[in-house]
Amino acid sequence: MWVIETHDLTKVFRSAWGKVVVAVDGINLRVPSGCVFGFLGPNGAGKTTTLNLLLGNLRPTKGTALLLGHPIGDPEVRRLVGYLPEKFQFHDFLTSEEFLDFHAQLLGVPKRIRKKRIDEVLDFVGLKERRKSKLREFSKGMLQRIGIAQALLNEPRLVILDEPTSALDPLGRREVRDLIVRLKAEGITVFLNSHLLSEVEMTCDAVAIINKGRLVFQGQLKELLQMPTQLDIRFQNPSSKWQQVVASFGEIISVKGDGLSVRVQDEKLIPDLIESLVKSGARLLSVVPKRLSLEDLFVKVVTDEQI
Amino acid sequence: MSKFENVNIVLLPKVSFWKRWILPIFVIAQLTIKEATRRWAFIGGLILGVGMMMLLAYVFANVRRQGEFLPAEIQASLIVHFGLVMTRFFSAVMATVLACGAIATELERGTLTLVVTKPIRRWQIVMGKWLGFAFVLTINQLIWLVVIEWGAWNRLGQWHWGVWKAGAIGLLYPLIFLSLNLFLSVHLPWIFVALISFVFAGIGWSETAMRNIGILANLPRLLTLSQIAGYLMPTGKLARWMVVESEVLDIVPRLSGPPGIEMPTPTVGDLIYVVAYIFVLLLMAFWLFGRKEIAN
């Protein structure tokens, strides 16, 4: 079941001088329900523009999209969506309780449950003791947490977080990461727009990678990380004969001194490869599997390198 | 067949008419009031206005002609007339200062970014802001009117009802500037909005000046320009109504123009035009903000 589905979603900006910029180029995105979905891409790839299209801040030039089964641009669907933008500034003269009350009213949270709901979200983000504190007294991490709290006031089905950890120190990042994991545990779909790949690797189930406005990968994170494994093999008795054996198992990337690097399609092939080499007379000094991190894969994908 | 398949259609919660259409406006208005009354522009403007009007009352109460104080009626009329002129000036400045950064600048700063992604229509945001600012400006102006009335009462020992009749009409004065500023602030940064607003204030002010010069120097084109200026910025139309309603013309007959030139009689049509002017600006702000693409 898709929580977000876009069909050929396109956004073209035209400047007053006639310059055309295709920010989002016909993307077909599908976000499954109940997962943490990472939306990745380098700066300027079109991530935030896509979010703005989904939230109705921008009108698509072409294509359509559904949010929780409803057309984007319908303000009513936002009653079920929580959102924290990357760039925000709260009215810092308000206390955290007043701030949440303001947003709860905009979201239409009934008066009889508003106070209880504010208590719940403050508790969820660990700021219950600071309910009477003015927002101007908050640290960046606390502001980020109160931002997440306002995104949860309406018990959303989908929470969209735009670079939620970009301005935080490692401790703050960890807090936000923990919150995301807890949201997932509560069955909420989290759409995480980020370029911090380590965060995504730790929290996301599925990812999509966008580059120059185009979707270049979409699928399970596991699937992405299971992509070809690199092996670094060193020989005591290097010979071109071993290269032929290795080549029958995968693509040789480089040959250097007494060793070579090979990319195998499946980890399960590694024992067979070693056995074949030994049977052929190769004396192995070391065989080091090098799993590609999300960062390596990301760089490969966005630089159009074949994985 | 639909191009969307396997879509998780989540039913939207049922929302009452009040919650969908009215409540968001008042929520925005409430925050706008809170925000505006905390700003130095408001507090400072209010205090400065009160101070200036008290000073005015003191000065006119002590003006002497050939060693003698002016009659109390004339003192009171001068206090009322110039007090109302000052309310027009200060309320215009205050409306501009408060509303010039209401939309584009707030989006740029990020304070409006969260609001636009809530289940709220853009026109409701503009309406809420307009109501909030209008409330603040009205309260502010009522306080100034109390000071003017105090100055007049001090001289006459009785109420000068003209203050309230003119003051009631004068409440529209800051609303002209408020609507203009909100409309401009949809796309422009605050500095440009404030600048254009002051240019428009100049156009409004020049209506009377051009008219007077046009009559004195017999320049029909200047008279036409004066009329155009009056339609572009109808502050002059409102000011004339205030002069008439303030009931000072009998005592201070020539305050509104050079000798020999009578102030044009204000008509109900002028008032209708001012109200329509405010209304149209507000509608245009709704429309513009509704179409604005927000790419934060």
Image (cartoon, helix red, strand yellow):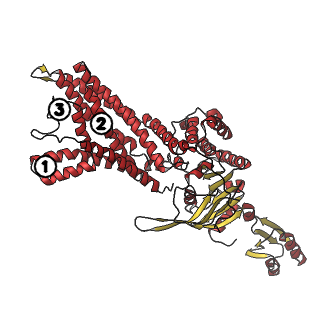
What SS does tag 1 mark? Answer: helix
* Residue B26, numbered circle: none
Q: CA distance from mark 1 to mark 2?
A: 27 Å
Horizontal and vertical percent position of residue B111: 50, 45
The residue tagged 2 is B170
What SS does tag 2 mark? Answer: helix
Horizontal and vertical percent position of residue A47: 58, 60
Q: Which callout, 1 or 3, points at the residue further toward the start of the chain? A: 1
The residue tagged 1 is B214
The residue tagged 3 is B249
Q: Which callout, 2 or 3, points at the residue further toward the start of the chain? A: 2
Horizontal and vertical percent position of residue A37: 68, 57
Q: Nearer the viewer, mark 1 or mark 3?
A: 3
Left or right, residue A249 beside residue A188: right
Tell which of A9 and A307 is nearer to you: A9
Q: Residue at x 66, y 45 (%)?
A: A155
The chain ID associated with circle 2 is B
Q: Residue at x 33, y 47 (%)?
A: B276
Q: Are marks 2 and 3 in contact (CB under 8 Å)?
A: no
Tell which of B148 and A205 is nearer to you: B148
Labels 1, 3: one chain: yes
